[in-house]
Amino acid sequence: MPRNWKEEVVFTAIMAGLMVFVMTAYNVTMAQGFSNGLVLAILGGYPLGLLVAIILDLLVVGPIAKGLAFKYIINDYMRKRTVLIGITISVLMVLGMVTCMSLFGIAVEGELSGAHVLATYGHTWLFNLIVALPLQLLIVGPIARAVLGKMQAATAKREADAVTEKD
């Protein structure tokens, strides 16, 4: 888990960057299939999606997911095993981000009108969840946590070296 704002920003950038890229590629491919303009369509949708995802992650979904996790889900047993805390927060984050980003996606595609909007949203939400949850738990989450761990280890080493130099 990130311990300070710098670590939170790096962790979020890796997490959101990878998740948004893969989910953008998935959604664009689902919408238009494999075509000549696929790569350009993915790259065209990525920056705005990333910006929205980072804002939602840092300001809305992240605080709500962490608040719910620590208030209602995480117990004393889980506190002794940080991996369980990470998994719990990851699942809540995926649920929140899929909920928000699916709405964002259908809004950007102009699908928020008509009688079919709830069906479109439900379909989009379910199909995004099916991909996002395993992507987060099995690939992106472990990558982001590994980078964060290396970052925290380097910080601890620098602090230990600084203390040694003072002595």
Image (tube, rainbow, N blue to C red):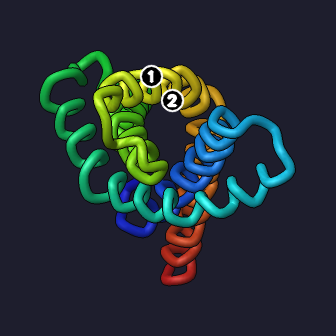
Find the residue positioned furthest to the left. 71
Residue 61 versus residue 126: which sits nearer the camera? 126
Q: Secondary structure at mark 1?
A: helix
Q: Residues within 10 Å of mark 2 (few under 14, many from 20)?
A: many
Q: What's the residue at 46%, 64% (across, down)?
A: 51
Question: Which quarter of the image is occupied by the N terminus?
Answer: top left
Q: Secondary structure at mark 2?
A: helix
Asked which quadrant contains residue 111, the reply is top left
Q: CA distance from mark 1 to mark 2?
A: 8 Å
Q: Which residue is mark 1?
A: 123
Contact (Cβ within 8 Å) of mark 1 with mark 2: no
In the rendered structure, the answer to whether residue 22 lies left or right of residue 159 reads right
Identify which amino acid the numbered label 1 is placed on.
His
- Above or below, 153 against 113 in this view is below
Find the residue positioned furthest to the front. 114
Q: Which residue is mark 2?
A: 128
Tag in front: 1 or 2: 1
Asked which quadrant contains residue 135, the reply is top right
Q: What's the residue at 81%, 38% (across, down)?
A: 34
